[in-house]
Each structure stands twice: as C-alpha cells, then as structure tokens.
Amino acid sequence: MLTRRSFAAGAAAVAGLAGLGLRSRALAAPDALTTLSDGQLEMPTDFVLRGIPDATLEEIGIDRGALGATHASPCNLTLLRGADRLVLFDAGAGTNFMPSAGKLPESLDAAGIDPGEVTDVIFTHAHPDHIWGVLDDFDEVPFANAAFHVCQTEWDYWRSDAALAEMPEDRQSFVIGARSRFEAIEDRSTLFKPGTEVISGIEAVAAFGHTPGHCAFVLHGEGAPVMVVGDAIINDPISFARPDLSWGADQDPETGAKTRSALLDRLASEKMRFVGFHLPNGGLGRVETEGAGYRFVPDA
C-alpha cells in the first residue's frame, strides 16, 4: 500500500485541542500539529502572475523579468495528531497530476506513519493537488481506515452539470478527477456546512472564491487557535501585500480577493497562527500588518 509524509511545525495550539483528545505539548513538539510535504507545483510564471501589471509588481519589490519562466509552489498538508485521532487536511495530488507533486507517500514514510493510521481526512476543496491523492496507482484508497469530510457546497458543485459546462477545456480534467475521487470515498464521506464543527474542536469557515465551496478550518480548544487556510492565501509576498488582486487560479477571482482580505485581517488582528498550503517554510506562521497590506512571518 502506498504511503505519504514529511513534517516540520510546532504546536502552540496543541493544549487547545482537548476536543480532539490531544495530549498537552510544548511549542516545539513535532508530533501534534505539523505539515507534510507533497512536493511542489511547477507552473508557468506568466500563468501565476496573469493579470497583474508590472507596475504593481514593482511596488511590491518584484522584478517579473528576474523570476524565470517557471514558478515552483510548495504543497503543505497539515497533520494533527491526537491520542485517538490522526487528522489529515487534504490528501495531496497523487501520481497523476504533476511529476513534481504527489510526494505525500514518501513524506508519510519518512515520518513513520502508515496511511491506514489516518482516522480523518478533511478537505479544503477539490482541486487536483488537494484531492487526487485519495486514489493510488491501483485506484485504491490508501487511507483504508479514514472517514472523509467534505463541504456540502463543494461536493454538490463538482458533481453538478454546471461544473463541467463552466470549466475551461484545459481544466475539465479537474471535474472528472474530482468526481472519480468523490465516488471512491462516497460511502465513507460526511458532508458539513461552514460554521459547524467537522469533528470536535475543528470549525469549518467559509472561504469561498478559489472554488465555490472552499473552506478554511479553525482548530479550537483551551489554548491559542490555529487556522488551516488551504488555497485562500496562496502566494507570498503578493497575496499579503495586495490581497485585493485577482488570481487566475481562483474560480471566482472577485470573491477570492474578498475572502483573502477578510482572512488576513482576522489572522493579523487576532494574531492567530495559521497554515497555508502553498506558502514557504512548511506553510506555518503568522500574519503581520505592513503598510497598507500584510506580510507572512513563518515559524522560526
């Protein structure tokens, strides 16, 4: 059976996750809240920066010409370990999306974790790099003992006729892939709505825009909460300096920009630690205000 893993984090919020049965741990404890690498996405820089004027990039201190033709975006999956639960947020890309991604099996192996130990997989959304990993090379689900949790809006959208009709031709495989993964896990899936607890101590937060049912998650408890933001905040430093900018990767760019601004404001004002799926240094850190925008401060 294939495996998937690799981690580095800290657990300031660990004591606050009593609802998950987590043991209280110090900040440096690596086995409560951590991130696993699924490799990286390698995309044309022109696609990543599509629609962003050179003058705007210069204001942020970015020279488009110095960036090269390809942009590498890390993929960080969040893992939450408790006394009786092992919760994985998203499932990675698997082996059929992009050669540079789909490394979760190796990362899990390196961490000494068998996929069968995972008790819950909670999805931020159903793009390939987040859900295609629920099927291995043999079209089997490697998380043999896990329950799966999907936002009702996201589940309904990808299975709808509208999803295929609205999707550009070069992304129609996203719809077909999401449907096949949902079909594979349907009997083990629970659908949730934003504003509710997915499982005890984990609150779903509407973070729509990147996809119609994209969600973030706040891990609550007696200590400081932590937010898993998925792809609602996807680029450092551009998304932080100018959260109002539209991104080609967002299915609804206007809603995505509003969501991004609201999340960054909350993270900065509440000084909340968070995890970003495509952010550097394992994706764990905090947000600070900087001028009219924000900046990402990764965990040391």
Image (cartoon, helix red, strand yellow):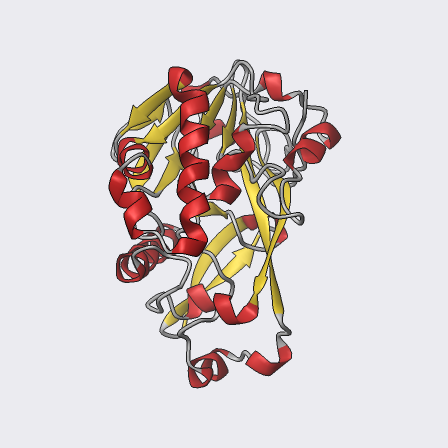
Residue 236 horizontal/vertical position (percent): 51, 63
Extreme residue toward the bottom, this view: 55
Residue at 47% of width from left, 56% of height from top?
234
Residue 116 horizontal/vertical position (percent): 60, 16
Residue at 32% of width from left, 68% of height from top?
244
Image quadrant where residue 264 sits: bottom left
Image quadrant where residue 220 sits: top left
Give the total of numbered labels.
0
Residue at 30% of width from left, 44% of height from top?
163
Vertical arrangement, residue 141 with respect to residue 178, above or below: above
Whether residue 122 appears in this view of the structure is no
Residue 202 horizontal/vertical position (percent): 38, 29
Q: Nearer the viewer, residue 175 or 24?
A: 175
Vertical arrangement, residue 236 with respect to residue 186, above or below: below
Residue at 59% of width from left, 22% of height from top?
142
Vertical arrangement, residue 266 with respect to residue 203, above or below: below
Q: Nearer the viewer, residue 137 or 284?
A: 137
Whether residue 81 appears in this view of the structure is yes
Q: Nearer the viewer, residue 273 or 196?
A: 196
Horizontal side of 231 relative to 42 (left or right) equals: left
Horizontal side of 177 relative to 207 (left or right) equals: right
Residue 204 horizontal/vertical position (percent): 32, 34
Extreme residue toward the right, this view: 110
- For the N terminus, the image quarter is top right
Vertical arrangement, residue 174 with respect to residue 67, above or below: above
